[in-house]
Image (cartoon, rainbow, N blue to C red):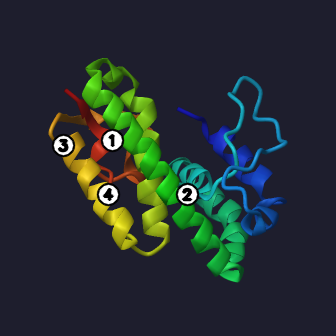
Amino acid sequence: MKSAAYDRAYLEAIQSVLEDYLHAQDLYWMLRAEPPKGEPPFPCLTLGNVLLAYTRLRARSSAEAEALFAPIAQLREQWRTAWNKKARHELQSRLQCWADYLHEYETDPAQAAYYTYQVRQRVIVELLAQDLGGWPEAEADLCHRLDRVLRASFAPGPFIWDKDLAPAFPAGPFWFLYGHPK
């Protein structure tokens, strides 16, 4: 799992390009920033990745996360229509990626070995839906169907990511982080 320094650096790196990103057609925007030494490359700029980095950092350093997110939140309010359009587009894209993974898992149960990484798609879907203030109907229907597929083979258990992140991802909305496919 990424460190607090990694999430902090990611949120800092997107500050100068976020407004341009909101007005661009691209859903995935390459960042020209270096992560902290010894950390993996940053993911593309997407609203889901921003929300994920913010949520993880908030679990580890709440005041710092709020300070870094304040200008992002201001841009979100200033460009709410563009933000929501991009967020919904990403939600659809991430749901499709999640559906693809679950289909692969159904046809090849060995794919369960990749669950801890792949579930990131479902986490981002949940964060985007929360940010949008609820689920768009079509996406809600698809997500419920996908959740039924996962629940059919899900073994509840302990939180699967770094334990210090658990408070930011409560078991209610993030139940899929508390266990693995069987």
Q: Amino acid at mark 4?
A: Leu
Residue under label 3: 151
Q: Are marks 3 and 4 in contact (CB under 8 Å)?
A: no
Q: Position of residue 86 (x, y in %)?
A: 61, 66
Q: Amino acid at mark 3?
A: Arg
- Crowding around mark 2 (Cα neighbors within 10 Å: few <14, some 14 to 19, many 20+) is many
Please tell me which residue is depicted at 53% across the width and 48% down the height of the picture: 56
Residue under label 2: 90
Q: Secondary structure at mark 2?
A: helix
Q: Is residue 84 left or right of residue 118?
A: right
Residue under label 4: 142
Please tell me which residue is depicted at 62% across the width and 64% down the height of the picture: 66
Q: Is residue 29 left or right of residue 85?
A: right
The disc, 3 or 4, on the residue closer to the chain's N-terminal end is 4
Residue under label 1: 177
Q: Secondary structure at mark 4?
A: helix
Q: Secondary structure at mark 1?
A: helix
Inter-mark Cα distance, 1 to 4: 19 Å
Q: Are marks 4 and 2 in contact (CB under 8 Å)?
A: no
Report the number of discs.
Answer: 4
Inter-mark Cα distance, 4 to 2: 14 Å
Q: Position of residue 24 (x, y in %)?
A: 77, 64
The disc, 1 or 4, on the residue closer to the chain's N-terminal end is 4
- Crowding around mark 3 (Cα neighbors within 10 Å: few <14, some 14 to 19, many 20+) is some
Examine the rendering and report whether any part of residue 161 can be seen: yes
The disc, 4 or 2, on the residue closer to the chain's N-terminal end is 2
Q: Position of residue 100 (x, y in %)?
A: 40, 38
Q: Secondary structure at mark 3?
A: helix
The disc, 1 or 3, on the residue closer to the chain's N-terminal end is 3
Residue found farthest to the left: 152
Q: Amino acid at mark 2?
A: Glu
